[in-house]
Amino acid sequence: MCGIVGYIGKRQAYPILIKGLKRLEYRGYDSAGVALINEGCDLNVYKAKGKVSDLEEYVGDKDISGVVGIAHTRWATHGEPCQVNAHPHYSSSGNLALIHNGIIENYATLKAKLQAKGYLFKSSTDTEVLVQLIEYIQTNKNLELLEAVKIALRSVIGAYAIAVLDKRMPGQIIAARKSSPLVVGVGEGEFFLASDASPIVEFTDKVVYLDDEEVAVLNPAEELKVVNLHNVGVNPEVKTIDLELSQLEKGGYPHFMLKEIFEQPDCLNDCMRGRVNVEANHVVLSAVIDHKERLLAARRFIIVACGTSWHAGLIGKHVIENFCRIPVEVEYASEFRYRNPVIDERDVVIAVSQSGETADTLAAVEMAKKKGAFIYGICNAVGSSIPRNTHTGSYIHVGPEIGVASTKAFTGQVTVLTMLALCLAKEKQTIDEAAYLQLVEELSRVPDKMKQVLEMNGRIAELSRIFTYAHNFLYLGRGYNYPVALEGALKLKEISYIHAEGYPAAEMKHGPIALIDAEMPVVVIATQNGMYEKILSNIQEIKARKGKVIAIVTEGDQVISKLADDVIELPGTLECLEPLITTIPLQMLAYHIAVCKGKDVDQPRNLAKSVTVE
Ligand code: M6R
């Protein structure tokens, strides 16, 4: 989604803003722009459709001087992606420039009122309405920018993170947020602003996360000032971020996605560090220690999530129900939040989200909280909105995920859900000691087994070439591997734009089998587990109709290997841990097919990394 960067201090702002925008490219966008106040107090705005590099080209040798500026990457909501709709937007007088992430839901009403007062609009955006509204209030009531911004935001319905410049007050940036993230970086005599910490980390590790309805005044001559919309002063809590610059770079890989696929063994070790202790034969999660009674008293768990995180939730349901005997429902956050679900203080809601900012998941959390449920967050982005709005939770600790297609976050989420199941099962005594010990031990071996799978990258790259021209793909799995089939299909469609569907293998004969012919590649997860014989029959059914089977099997498999057209052999593990292994070749397959097709793997069309609008 849209990205915000701001700078005010002693350095030239433009290079910092452009670098920041590039760091935010992973979020997905279709146009970019920058506003700078130069020494003569001119407010220069430059915008371009396309990438940040298109903006740089457009800027050329125009005046980019100035020690204060704001910049934006836009992911179109209101109005097509084009230069006019790109941010920043000027106010009518040209005194103000504003950038905005989120959606102003009542923009049409506000716009009509402003039009009635003679305001003209150049763009189709909700953002331009906001900057005009601020200017209208400022002029009419003869107020300073800060006051006008607060009044304007009190009349706004919707979500926003904004930054505003006023050329008559070049020594400050005003920033505010509601339901859309905004971070202030605190340097020596300078401030940075961004939608996440990635553009800031190079300059300072001191940050302030703004809360909903807070407005910040960034003036390098003063301390950071934060007030809420109702004029109550807030003491900004400066936090130290633990983020290395190298985590935000490709480190020699051609794409972030491939880097992140390969990081998974290390990520899982980080995720389990201090939690899975093989010597002492136990798994601990501090959230379970702190809230044991509340969690064990739950009549059911409801997992809310979107996309890949929802797939991880499906695996979480299997593992928690299997070992803890607690009923678990898995809900799309976007459906759950709008259907008045039966939920009360006896329920525990588990919100799973890589970014911690997904608007629907956040809204589901708020709604469940109001109904009295206890909320447990499983997130990656430290300090993001979901962890800040839950009662407790566990970070997955896999480091920043930049590729739009989620990979390491998925395996991190599955690992945390598995650890949660193990902790609770032990407390509830619903797992016998031998099974528990075996699971703890095997979980700790998963990173090494993942490394073995990653060694097949070259082979999978070769295999991918054959399928580059396929128009459809089917992914089949059963039990723990059914969500992996869904995830494999999602990965392929996201980055290669090939239509793909995931199905529980046995459901194939209830419809999708009609699609199978010699042109249809079918990826079947057919590992040696309790479902093996059943999956074998499903493969026979596909072969009888001349479908092309790519089978994901356990090493040493003699039967399916002879039946399938292509086979990827994986190290064996316990059935409930298989998704952590079987998902890796599907990530690699999707990646290589997309690369063969020449697609933009890290920034696929129309997609955003962090979906902060509903
Ligand atoms: O940040 P979240 O985990 O809440 O994001 C949820 C989905 O938007 C996300 O998983 C999306 O489906 C990914 N692009 C999948 O690769």
Image (spheres, helix red, strand yellow):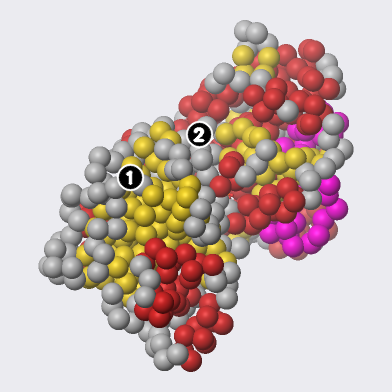
Question: Closest to the observer: 555 or 363?
Answer: 363
Is residue 574 at all visible to an observer of this figure? no
The residue at 76%/25% (across/down) is: 292
What's the residue type where badge 2 is placed? Val
Q: Is residue 327 left or right of residue 549?
A: right
Residue type, numbered disc 1? Glu
Magenta run includes residue 320: yes
Q: Position of residue 342 (x, y in %)?
A: 85, 53
Mark 1 Cα within 10 Å, few/some/many (few <14, many 20+)? Answer: few
Camera-nearest residue between 484 and 282: 282
- Of labels 1 and 2, earlier in sequence is 1
Considering the numbered disc 2 on the image, is that residue within a helix, a strand or a loop? loop
The residue at which mark 2 appears reads as 398
Determine the CA span between mark 1 and mark 2.
34 Å
Q: Quadrant of residue 159?
A: bottom right
Left or right relative to 130: residue 507: right
Does the residue at mark 1 contact the one at mark 2 (Cβ under 8 Å)?
Answer: no
Nearest the eye: 286 or 345: 345
Residue neighbourhood size for the residue with mark 2, other residues' Cα within 10 Å, grouped as few (<14), some (14–19), many (≥20): many
The magenta segment is 316-344
Q: Tell me if 324 is positioned left or right of 263 in this view.
A: right
Quadrant occupied by the C terminus: bottom right
Question: Would residue 413 be counted in the magenta stretch?
Answer: no
Examine the rendered structure and indicate whether residue 326 appears above or below residue 158: above
Q: Is residue 64 above or below residue 366?
A: below
Write down the quadrant of residue 38 in the picture: bottom left
